[in-house]
Image (cartoon, helix red, strand yellow):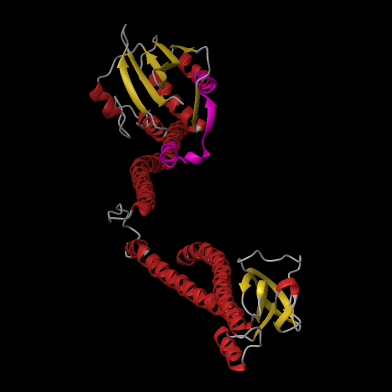
Amino acid sequence: MNSIRTKLLLWLMIPLVIIAAIVSLETFFSSRKISNDLNDRTLLAATLTILENVISSNGTLLADATLQTLTDNLGDRFFYHVTGPNGAFVTGYSNYPRPANSQAPQLGKPLYFDGIHQGEPVRVVQLRQDLSGRALNGTTTITAWQRVTKRAELTLSLFARSLMRLAMLVLAAGAIVWFAVAIGLRPLIGLQSAIERRTPYDLNPIKRLMPVELRGIVSSMNELFERVSRSKRNRERFIGDAAHQLRNPVAAIKVQAEAALAAGQKSNVDSSLHQIVQVVDHSTGMINKMLSGASAHSLDREQESTHDLVPMVEEATLMAAPRAFDNDQDISFSKPTKQMLFQGNLVLLREAVSNLIDNAIHHTEPGTVIEVGLVLSGENIEIYVADSGRAITQEEFLTLTQPFLTRDDSSSGSGLGLSISKDIAKSHGGYLATSEQAGGGKRISIILPSQ
């Protein structure tokens, strides 16, 4: 039952067999009716023949040759009984079957019914006629009957022939369906062959011309290839960035450690150790940000849930407030009056907002004002961080959102903050944007689609 061909064949053949069974029943009853009608007419013709012979012979018995001829033509043994006016017996067999409800035939109209004669089922016809002759003058009733053996055989013969034709039709339909399904599945087999010929490194989209029913599968596979390819590129990028960025800090730690070992005075040793701690702290912060960026690239949409963004942005602002105060900066949160619901990864979104706030704190002068807020802008949710520092152009913004690029040459920043925020926004269907403040300064925003 794991075969699509077998399933399709069963789903097509089972209803066809059921319909064939219903048709077979109808065929059986039709065959029986045809056989009965044909035999009834033959029986009536034989009855009329007997009546003519009785009239012409003045009520004597039929000749054996005539009776044998009728029996041969009818196919079963034949019997008859004739009564004249007032029910007087004329000729024939004395013991004849009678209708169950004692119904009498109408004048000139045959009455058919089933009966029993000598312990065997028979078919009976009665006919009343007004006669005028030398021996029979008045209403005469003739009853004729015959056994139903040949009648049943004719019914079974007609039914068997119809059933044979129907069985051949069902088998032919099954064979046609089998080969039709085989032909219909060729594109799927071709797709399988094309995928099997691919190497583990070939993640290019499938461009084969496929039937309509398979285009959705091919489209989903191409999307999967694209996601795997993107994940592979991000992993290679992460490994390359990590190797590049950690090489210098590791070398600096080694140099400082050698200097501490070579230093003769305790003050020189303490200075070297202090510098080692600073390098380690800087490397740790950079590694954490790189891991956050890697998490943004590998975001699993199935693990997302709906959150209110207002408490998250407020918490990120409160966490950054001590750093802003130490830098002699004012920071505020413009809290909206209603909820801002969004489906996404709350941890990564908090990381993106925190990076924007840290960027504003780090790259603005003391005494500046930093404002954090959320607004509903059209069909989007905007999370913004505005400061009164120097504005940046769009060209500068595009440069600063690249990994490991900063506006200054200081070593205190990793150059990953804006890049990670951009990646997180993109992974949630949004983007990062910047604009100038009306009174001076800049505003960097995470634009997310409202839900």
- On the question of residue 189 being in view, the answer is no
In the picture, measured across the screen, residue 207 lies left or right of residue 291, that is left
Magenta: main secondary structure equals helix
> Residue 335 at x, y = what percent?
50, 13
The residue positioned farthest toward the top in the image shown: 439
Query: Which residue is depicted at the point 23% across and 24% down?
Result: 395
* Residue 306 magenta: yes
> Residue 390 at x, y = what percent?
30, 14
Query: Which residue is depicted at the point 38% across and 63% down?
Result: 185
Q: Quadrant of residue 285?
A: top left
Q: Nearer the viewer, residue 236 or 179?
A: 179
> Residue 284 at x, y = what percent?
45, 36
The residue positioned farthest toward the left in the image shown: 395
Q: Quadrant of residue 378?
A: top left
Tell me if residue 243 comes above or below residue 283 in the rendering: below
Query: Which residue is depicted at the point 27% across and 54% down?
Result: 207
Q: Nearer the viewer, residue 349 or 106?
A: 106
Q: Nearer the viewer, residue 117 or 236?
A: 117
Q: Quadrant of residue 51?
A: bottom right
* Residue 425 magenta: no
> Residue 321 at x, y = what percent?
50, 17
The residues colored magenta run 292-317
